[in-house]
Every structure is written in C-alpha cells, then in structure tokens.
Amino acid sequence: MQAVSEKCVTRNEQAYLTMRRMIATGQMVPGKWLKKLDLAEEMNMSPTPVVEALRRLQHEGLVEVEARVGVRVRSFTVEEVRELYIMREMLECAVARECALKFEPYQVMRFHQLAVQLDELNQRWSDPDLAETFSQDALSEEEVTFHLGLAHEAGLALIAKELERLAVLKTTCRLILLPGPTMSVSHETIMDAIAAGDPEEAEQAMRHHVQGIREKVVPLLRERFGDGPILWNDQQL
C-alpha cells in the first residue's frame, strides 16, 4: 500500500512539473483549453495526476477554471503584466546580489556562456527579418535555464519557484510582440557584474535589465490593448 502511495505522489509531481514548464516556455499558450484526457494520454499517465496538477496550477494562478466549460491557461491584462514585471524586478535583483556574494569562478564561467547564448537569441527575436521564423521555444528554454539557474545556484529555491511562475509573462509578450524590443542591459552585462563580486553593481545591472524591458513592453501592449485583456488572434488569450 505504501509503495502505491509513493508512486502516486511521484506521478502527481511529474504531471505538475511537466505542465508548469510547458506553460512557462509557451508550449501551452495563454488561453489554450486543457483537456484532462488528452493531457494524460500525452504524458502517458492516468487522469488522476493531471487533475491534481491542474489544481496546483490553478492555485498558483497559471490556469483558470470556467464553470461548466473547462480549464485553460490563464491570460493577463496589460496592468497585470506591468505588476508582474515589478515583482520580477524585486526577486531577480535579490538573486543577482546573492550570486555576486556566493558564486565561484566555475559558476561564473558556466553562466557567462549561457548569457552570451541568450543575448544572441534575444537579438534574433528583436530582428524584424528573423523574428517571424524564430523559435520561441528555444529562447524560452534558455531564459528559464539562465534566470532560474541563477536562483537555484544561489540557494534561493523559493524565489526560483516564484520566478518560474512569472516566466509565463515572457511567453505572453513574445507571442504578441514580434519582433520584440531590444534589451537595455544584456545578460552578459549582468554576469560581468556578478563576476566582479559586487552585490550593488549586480543588483543595479539586473534592475536596469528588467526595468528596461518593462518600459518598452508595457507601452507597446497598452497601445494595442489599452488596459483590457491581452488578445491573441482576436480572442482572449
């Protein structure tokens, strides 16, 4: 009986983590209706873990339930996106400070390489000639690896979990804004500040990075959608 229980918990966690990552990276786009049986078949499991995962995702605000209709990936209003960027700024600045205080040379080297790759992908996303054919999944995966990786490496597991939830806003913006805005401060610049071991400099670099994106993205979204919900193909995301 105990073995069955442990197996059930493991499957529940597997379903939850898989679906959470799919939302964060845009494989499940905002507004997508989620069918329990289809998800269970896709993940090769029974519907029970899927139902439990959906409950957890609803509690985190990543999916929403519409009575007598179903469950779908949650969308955001423009004002909610602005607020989420403010939350992200606070959390990521704390991560940058901790990294500057704790990182060893091998960690700096590894994340510097990730930063360079991520900056190259962002440049392609903001290039009008490349954005339409660019793989959004690749950029989303690299950003999740970099930003969540920094938090985990700094020993900030709770912040990492919250940042993964906030990652859905990046996906929403990328689906709408093609080409995307250029970065004010690159990821490589953030890593240079962390490598210097100066927590104030690292925090400032991260703040300018997130603020710069927010100050470009939010006006573009507001110009298109006002203060209402962000729309996708003339329907609510």
Image (cartoon, helix red, strand yellow):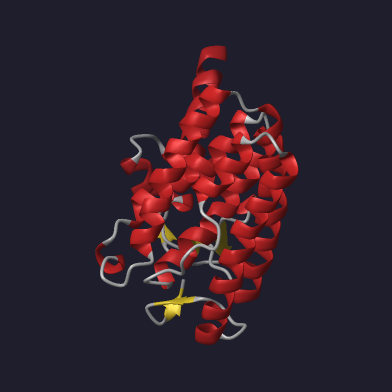
The residue located at (56%, 24%) in the rendering is: 105
Residue 42 location, x and y as percent?
32, 43
**29 sits left or right of 224 in the view:** left
Residue 122 location, x and y as percent?
41, 57
**129 sits left or right of 188 in the view:** left
The residue located at (67%, 56%) in the rendering is: 207
**223 sits left or right of 206 in the view:** left
Q: Nearer the viewer, residue 189 or 154?
A: 189
Residue 220 location, x and y as percent?
52, 79
218 to 60, vertically: above or below: below
The residue located at (50%, 46%) in the rendering is: 188
Give the number of marks.
0
> On the image, which quarter does residue 32 sit in?
bottom left
- Quadrant (top left, top right, bottom left, bottom right) of the N terminus: top right
Residue 37 location, x and y as percent?
37, 48
The residue located at (42%, 72%) in the rendering is: 177
Residue 1 visible in rendering: no
**233 sits left or right of 152 in the view:** left
32 to 94, vertically: above or below: below
Residue 62 visible in rendering: yes
Q: Nearer the viewer, residue 42 or 236?
A: 236
Question: Residue lying furthest front in this view?
Answer: 196
